[in-house]
Structure formats: structure tokens, C-alpha cells
Amino acid sequence: LCAQMLSHQPGAQLCRAGTACDLVISLRSMIPYVELLYIVLDADEKLWTLSERAKVKESGLGQIAFSVVPCSAGFLPYPSVSVYSCKSIGVEGVDIVPGIQLLSFLRTGGKQIRVLSASHSCSETVESKKGLKHKLGKLFD
């Protein structure tokens, strides 16, 4: 399996602190048969807020998206990704639990994503510009 984290918007690997950012994991299985996979994200709680930690993928090919919120600005390491096989339990096979961890290669291991500082609302920007204009006016009076 190959898993790679990508920003949801092509070419833009930017997120904003305090705002949800969609990270997409691209999977490519090297085995010829279809297998249920259990994908798990893990990250430092000081850097990332994960609303979803795990999802089930019905095949080893394609993409699966997670919504994450960066807690601070700067260059943050990508959350780590683990891939497990799935076991169905119960009468109907409806309940799914993670099985053994599968060997996978994470292309973004050791890489970072640039996170911009939190955006200010338009009203704050207008007020700060008025205040700055007033201060500059006093300076030249």
C-alpha cells in the first residue's frame, strides 16, 4: 500500500490555523484482490485537532478524505497514517474492527505542510486600518 497526504485543493498545500483543512489520503494497493482497509490518523494534539481518527475503505485503491484542524501557524508535520486489515464480526458482518497493521509506505513521512495564521474578520481589518490611519494622521499633525 502507498498512502500520501495531499491538500484537497490541487497545487495548494496550505491550511489556515483554526480552520478545517481537508487532507486526502491516496491509496494504491500492490495486491491483486480487494480487501477492506481500516485507515487511522494520529497526530500531536498540540498541532492538530482530528475530528475523525479512523475510516473504513472498501478497496485498496482510490482516495479517502479526513478533516483536520491545525492548531497553530508554521510548518507542521503531517499527521501519521496507519493502515490495518478489517475483520467483520457479528451475525450480518456489519460490525468492523481493525485487524493486523499492514506494511505501508507513507510518502509524506518526515515532510511538513505550511499552515497560515488564523484569518481576521473583515470588520477587524477595517477597524485596524482606521486606527492606523488615525495614528498616522496624529504623527504628521
Image: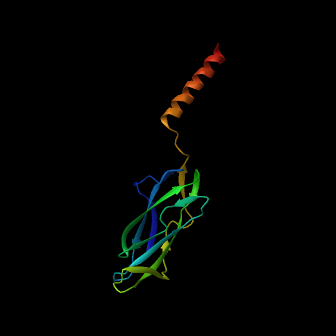
Residue 84 image point, x, y percent: 47, 79
- Left or right? Give the position of 127 relative to 1: right
Figure check: 61 above or below 134: below
Please report the residue visible at 51 percent of the width from the left and 65 percent of the height from the top.
108
Q: Nearer the viewer, residue 112 or 40?
A: 40
Q: How many marks?
A: 0
Q: Which residue sits furthest top?
A: 141
Quarter of the picture holding the N terminus:
bottom left
Q: Which residue sits furthest front?
A: 91
Please report the residue visible at 54 percent of the width from the left and 59 percent of the height from the top.
49
Q: Which residue sits furthest bottom?
A: 91
- Left or right? Give the position of 97 relative to 135: left
Residue 112 image point, x, y percent: 55, 59
Residue 40 image point, x, y percent: 49, 71
Q: Nearer the viewer, residue 53 or 8?
A: 53
| Applied colour scheme | rainbow
Residue 54 image point, x, y percent: 47, 70
Quarter of the picture holding the C terminus:
top right
Quadrant of res 22: bottom left
Figure check: 2 above or below 14: below
Please report the residue visible at 45 percent of the width from the left and 80 percent of the height from the top.
97
Q: Nearer the viewer, residue 64 or 2?
A: 64
Quadrant of res 87: bottom left
Please report the residue visible at 49 percent of the width from the left and 80 percent of the height from the top.
103
